[in-house]
Image: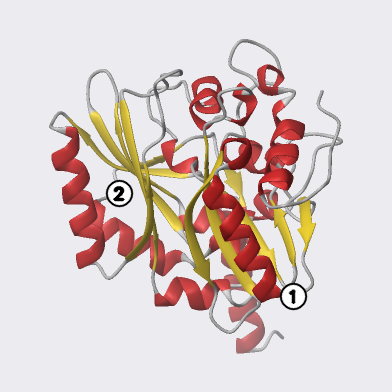
Amino acid sequence: MFSRKSVLLFLTLPLLILSGGAFASTIYKPFILAYEKAGDFQTIAKTTESQLKQAGFEIVGTYQPNLKTYHPYQAAKIFIITNKALLSDAAKTSRGGYGATMRVSVTKTKNNIQVAYSNPVYIQYAYRMKADLKPIKTELSKALGDQKSFGAKGLTASQLEHYHYTFGMEYFNEPYHLNSYGSHHRAVALIKKKLLQGDKGIHYLYQLNIPGTDQTIFGVSMDSKSNKDVNDAYQMSVVDFKALKGTAYLPYQILVKGSKAEALNMRFRMAVFFPDLSMMGGHSFMTLMSAPSALHHALAKATGGSYNPPLF
């Protein structure tokens, strides 16, 4: 005879399997559209800033890409934000600094203005953070809205944690190595000084120290006049061509970890935020084939490094 406990286990086991399968197959997309509507760009940008502050987020930097040469958008402004919970979450992993900020974009297109933000849960898995960023997503949803997620067909948590675009392309834990400085303090001071000089079209946007760690994250803008591969507007004109805009991909980041500086390889970072982009064609990774090496070269030089990767 089966015991009562055995019968209950037999009856509930299929439900556990089904619920486990449902959890495993949950997909995540890189961006969330808060809302889209007609209106005045500056007014909506100011409203967005006010909503973020009222929700307890700290705005550590803002970025308005230089769109004079390339025109992926009519206008764009990105707010780089954090809060105490997010900083605490970032401190739990050695490269958590990459996820210490979220990005909120206000983008003017031909017909409307879109307010969107990077999906915290997507970043949680893509950046292998040992933290639950769902509460951050909930706070952003309450502050700005949550009409729908977008930017890809979607990836599961497991796919994101082990993501690389294709054979031979880098994973999260294979960043660009930029420079070594002898100490964390020296690294941070010298990098900030160099970035403020704007060498190689790389410019300082913000600096954020992760409390209780030896991590400091810098945000940088790119507007090289001599090399379009090192230009945010050009890169986005290639990859961000669909109706809903992934402007919140910007800006790029440099992580100081201990006495060393690094940055996520573009062949990982751009691919994980635009994973459905084709390999070939007018709007494809092939169009930006030379950009990853050019970016590595520029970031190394802009932080005082001497590494010269081949430009191809």
Looking at the rendered structure, the kind of residue marked 2 is: Asp
Give the camera-side residue of 47 and 311: 311
Give the camera-side residue of 299 and 286: 299
Asked if residue 31 lies left or right of residue 296, the reply is left
How busy is the neighbourhood of tag 1: few (under 14 within 10 Å), some, or many (20 plus)? few
Please determine whether, in this image, residue 194 is positioned above or below residue 233.
below
How busy is the neighbourhood of tag 2: few (under 14 within 10 Å), some, or many (20 plus)? some
Mark in front: 1 vs 2:
1
Instruction: Give coordinates of residue 10: x percent, y percent.
Output: 65, 73
Q: Quadrant of residue 187?
A: bottom right
Q: How much space separates mark 1 and mark 2, taking CA atoms? A: 42 Å
Looking at the rendered structure, the kind of residue marked 1 is: Ser
Which residue does the image show at 84% across and 37% down from the upper left? Answer: 309
Give the camera-side residue of 111 and 224: 224
Instruction: Give coordinates of residue 288: x percent, y percent.
Output: 67, 22
Give the residue at mark 1: 183
In the picture, which quadrant includes the N terminus?
Answer: bottom right
Instruction: Give coordinates of residue 29: x percent, y percent.
Output: 50, 43
Give the residue at mark 2: 146
Instruction: Give coordinates of residue 167: x percent, y percent.
Output: 85, 35
User: Can the viewer see residue 138 in this picture?
Assistant: yes
Asked if residue 118 lies left or right of residue 116, the reply is right
On residue 226, the disc is: none
